[in-house]
Image (spheres, coloured by chain):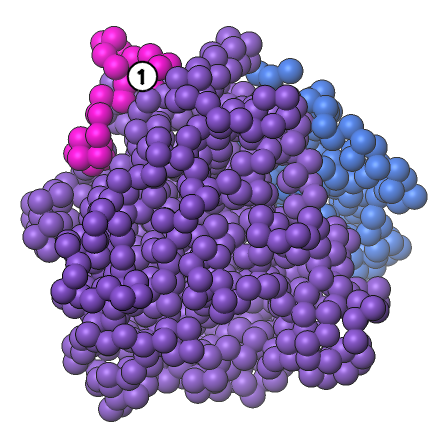
Amino acid sequence: MAERDAITDPWGARTPYGPGDSWPVRVDSHLADGVRAEDVDRWVPSAAVLHSNGDGLEIAVKDGRIVGVRGQADDRVNHGRLDPKDLYGWQAGASPDRLTTPLVCEGGRLVEATWDEAMRRVVTRSRELLDEQGPSALGFYTSGQLFAEEYYTLAAIAHGALGTNHVDGNTRLCTATAAAALKTSFGCDGQPASYTDVDHADVIALFGHNVAETQSVLWTRMLDRLAGPKPPALVCVDPRTTAVARAATVHLAPLPGTNVALMNGLLHEIIRNDQVDHAYVEKHTVGYDDLVQQVADATPERVADICGVPPEQIREAARLLGGAERLLSTVLQGFYQSHQATAAAVQVNNLNLVRGMLGKPGAGVLQMNGQPTAENTRECGADGDLTGFRNWANDDHVAELARLWNLDPMQIPHYAPPTHLMQMLRYAENGTIRFLWVSATNPAVSLPELARVRSILEQDRLFLVVQDAFRTETTEFADVVFPAAIWGEKIGTFTNVDRTVHLSEKAVEPPGAAKSDLDIFLDYARRMDFRDRDGEPFPAWHDAESAFEAWKKASAGRPCDYSGLTYDKLRAKNGIQWPCTAEQPDGTERLYVDGKFFADPDYCESYGRDLITGAPTEPDEYRSMNPDGKAMIRPAEYLSPHEMPDEERPFALITGRTLYHFHTRTKTARAPELQRAEPEVWVEMSERDAKECDLEDGDLARITTARGAVQAKVRLREIRDGVLFLPFHYGYWDTEATSERAANELTPTDWDPASKQPIFKTAAAAIARVEEDR
Amino acid sequence: MRLGLALRELHRSETSLAAFLYEVSDRHRVEHEVHHVARDLAGWSRAHVRDLAEAGERYGLSLRGTAPESSGLLAPVRRKVSELTGRRAETGLLLLADLRRLHRRTAGVSLDWELLAQGAQAIKDHELLELAQRCHPQTLRQLKWSNSMLKTLSPQVLVSG
Ligand code: SF4
């Protein structure tokens, strides 16, 4: 078992392997100072919760406290490895500043209260609003960090018991586009590929995916392939010269906001060189001719002008992609949080479709997630989609769900697409949403245009409930705060990017009166006295395992089928990929192996949306376009970004993440090693730009956009000229500063019309030295 | 020839649709999706206007090739008003009314394209037919957009406030 300083050595020692070989095991571990492995009382199975990779691990418990973690050697995801956040992040749970009791707002201050008092306020306000306005007054905004059982329960309460259409997760900020792109191309959400495809690929193409920092254990898998015999070629698309870019065979650094143009250029080349798998396209797809037409004039020269990438580089990348025998494509925030997010991510699906690179070892697409349990938010329906990848526009699907819940189908809103977060915020702004329940997320730091977000959350007319483990920038606006138990303090399942389901066991008791999110939601349901059609209490379940059994029934027959799983089965072998059924008891490694998709008009989760306008496709339109349920090749034209750099604000600002922190640092800043690694916000820029702005490495600079300002120390980095990068994790709870620290002070309110994911990667900005400095 | 009339009429309706899209965009500055997408879609109408002006030359018409790229001098005022009233639920009704108007205007443009395509077929003008086949689908997408925004936004407006 290896102990390393994962701050200075984030990826650890190489264990090289070759194509088709099994990735060697390397067990990583970290225990609190002075604790030896033999001192540990119990090792409790779980998986990583500070990113989306799903690394299997065990929690070390001694004297009723968490004292460390070690990687699970036989876990299919990580083969024992852990990343810096896994190794150190667990310490946050034992912080002295955990929330241990409910808080209620009295005379503008949050004061301690009993559960009865706090719940009474929430129930009373819910009832008043239901009487006055109906369910449209209530909205729910959840997370990518709860467990499946909790999301399913929330979805049942919000969509079913209350019947509001206003439910979303903060997955809207990070994986909404993954879901939208999969629905667009395959008719349904669900990750096609598997991490094991890294073991087989001869070309791995990473589109806006800084895997070295966002899923660093997956990166170690790639590094081990690169160090072994017959390494794969890497293609990297990123305006920053990241660790991935440095390891890449070809690195394309397009101007922010031009991904669709770049993708069209690559597709143009592949079609021109006739590297298309015509047999596959013919047999398994519709829409190819439209793509040919769309990219006909996207020549490398023309595209080069838009993207600021030399045409030879585009040709070279296309040669690699076009010549690959096993092509694995991955996509993340560089595409999802940028202009034309879905259109760009769909072009990656198109790339693999026209090349017939799907459903076989080494050939596939990974539309990545940001958060550990984002997949569950999506499949359980806590992101607004209907539970079990059901189609809100298909009355039969709604009726099926209503039967399952024993409710009237009219009770489940399906007259329009589910309200996404940014629209919910707008409704709160115009006063038509008057109750917002936020669980396990921190919108006062993570949403764009923070001045606006604060002005919405602070309104008196908005009743705000916040459920979290800590006080955050958001709890400070709340009317009621519920203290939540977190990872290690409760039991439940969650699912990573490649559909791997882990059971996470309870290791220790939550502090004080904190309760699991599941118990909080169920308590609310009982006090609201929700009933089904037979007058029985709804939801009918009462704890995690009964919630899981209910969720299994809801998922049965759908693509995300959990019916073959039980807690006991996961105890025997943790980490099984859905669909897992009686016929496929060991789970399913890859989807779409036989070129069969979930896209049949009667079965699909979504009829899709117009990639430019975002308008939902009508059912009959879908049926005539894709009667046989094939994969859909959907082209898109490039549109220029809504906010372009100009004389006054000459830079394109992108925000992003770092290896050492997660989300708004509520946990990672409370782990000393992680906090010390990156305690303060910084800004990255190129040397040339810095010179022109009279800035040097280490100078304090002020970055401004039309929305606000941030002060940050300058780091000279390899990043394309004309681009500034700011990490988005930093808010205000751990600083004297009350303004100009959070990157989202600068970002615009604008979102991709198809996925409704906010845009964090195209804003026009200026930068100047803070004068008193130096 | 009457076809010239149809061309001129379509050119007029596309030009005014572009202008109206900018107007809606500015009047609803605080409805971010409407604001941004309306501008993107105005771009399509502007391109149609340019192509129609070109086609018009062959019919001896002199049509302006450029449609305005903003809602004119009043743009800042419209945006300001939108921001000032953006916290009031009543603006929802104004939004629905504007989307309804937009939808009807777009439907008019769509019909005009249909007429032009019919005429082009009758006189076997391939170029004109090709133009209609290229542009009309975009008009239909504009139409679906206003329809879908109405469908999506109306329930909240109609049951609250
Ligand atoms: S940090 Fe961003 S990408 Fe990562 S989980 Fe949070 S929202 Fe998603």
State the image coordinates of residue A11 (x, y, percent, origin top left). Answer: 35, 76
State the image coordinates of residue A670 (x, y, percent, origin top left). Answer: 45, 55
* Vertical placement of residue A28 versus A21, above or below: above
Amino acid type for the residue under numbered disc 1: Arg
Q: Of A303 and A568, which appears nearest the observer?
A: A568
Residue under the point 83% across and 57% down: B65
Residue under the point 71% across and 55% down: A740
Q: Image check: A661 left or right of A358? A: right
Q: Which residue is mark 1?
A: A526
Quarter of the image that includes the C terminus of chain A: bottom right
Specify the quadrant of the image occupied by residue A378: top left
Q: Of A234 and A677, which appears nearest the observer?
A: A677
* Vertical placement of residue A463 versus A35, above or below: above
* Vertical placement of residue A99 versus A760, above or below: above
Check the residue under mark 1 and report the chain it is in: A
Quarter of the image that includes the N terminus of chain A: bottom left
Q: Residues within 10 Å of mark 1 (few under 14, many from 20)?
A: few
- The region drawn magenta spans A525-551
Q: Which chain is purple?
A: A
